[in-house]
Image (tube, rainbow, N blue to C red):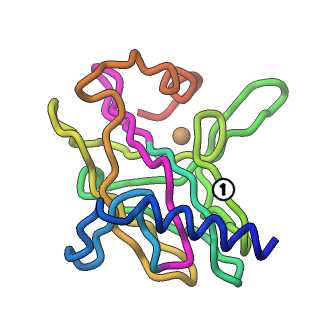
Amino acid sequence: MKKFLIALAAISLAACSGEVNHSEGDVSHAGHQMDEGMVISSARVLPPFPGRDTAAGYMSITNHSKTDDKLVSVTSPISGAVEIHSHMEDNGVMKMRQVDGIEIKAGETVELKPGSFHLMMFKANLPEGQEDVSVTLNYEKAPSVTMIVPVDGRGAEKAGSAHEDHGSGTKDN
Ligand SMILES: [Cu+2]
């Protein structure tokens, strides 16, 4: 197990070299964050459906530290209210609800993805053409990290296949 983790770290270091400017203080690019115990990959924000104003955020978070931790809140300048949601089946119906955080045990990866944990960014201010979003993750133990997350589908509209699942059955908005 230990060997596996070391190998993973080496891969992310290799992927990082020569590509990212780390001079921007605490702002790091998604997937290239290597000085903290929490490593984010595949982060993306799905813009709201036309006529709606709720964006969704997905990513995978790996806890490379030796202590269990928890993602407790998320903030972003594009939304005054970013909530952490989970999806669960209730009598055969998939429902989502706000949770007070996501536990990420030492050595484990949690995926925020359609049909599972996800971020909901209410009243998102995401003008056409904006291609990335600043997102800050706050943990129970690890230091908060701000990263730049690409907006999915911008530039090449992808018909929101993942978004479809997310939007169904919601009563908010
Ligand atoms: Cu939701």
Indicate the position of residue 9 as horizontal and vertical percent values.
Answer: 58, 70
Quadrant of the drawing holding the N terminus: bottom right
Residue 157 versus residue 15: which sits nearer the camera? 15
Total numbered circles: 1
The residue pinned by badge 1 equals 110
Q: Please say if 160 is above or below 111.
A: above
> Which stretch did the figure color magenta?
36-56
Say few, some or many: other residues with alpha carbon within 10 Å of mark 1 (under 14 / 14 to 19 / 20 or more). some
Image-quarter location of ligand 1 = top right
Residue at the (34%, 68%) spot, across then down: 146
**Left or right: where does residue 9 sit relative to residue 32?**
right
The reply to whether the magenta stretch includes residue 13 is no
**Left or right: where does residue 68 sit relative to residue 173?**
right
Indicate the position of residue 135 as horizontal and vertical percent values.
Answer: 34, 59
Quadrant of the drawing holding the C terminus: top left
Q: Is mark 1 within 8 Å of ligand 1?
A: no
Indicate the position of residue 125 as horizontal and vertical percent values.
Answer: 21, 42
Q: Please say if 73 is above or below 57.
A: below
Q: Please say if 126 is above or below 154.
A: below
Residue at the (50%, 54%) spot, across then down: 41
Residue 65 versus residue 19: which sits nearer the camera? 19
Indicate the position of residue 93 as horizontal and vertical percent values.
Answer: 75, 25
Residue 3 versus residue 125: which sits nearer the camera? 3
Residue at the (37%, 38%) spot, across then down: 55
The reply to whether the magenta stretch includes residue 42 is yes
**Left or right: where does residue 61 sit relative to residue 135?**
right
Name which quarter of the figure residue 26 lies in: bottom left
Residue at the (45%, 49%) spot, across then down: 43
The three-letter amino acid code for the residue at tag 1 is: Val
SS of the residue at dot 1? strand
Name which quarter of the figure residue 2 lies in: bottom right
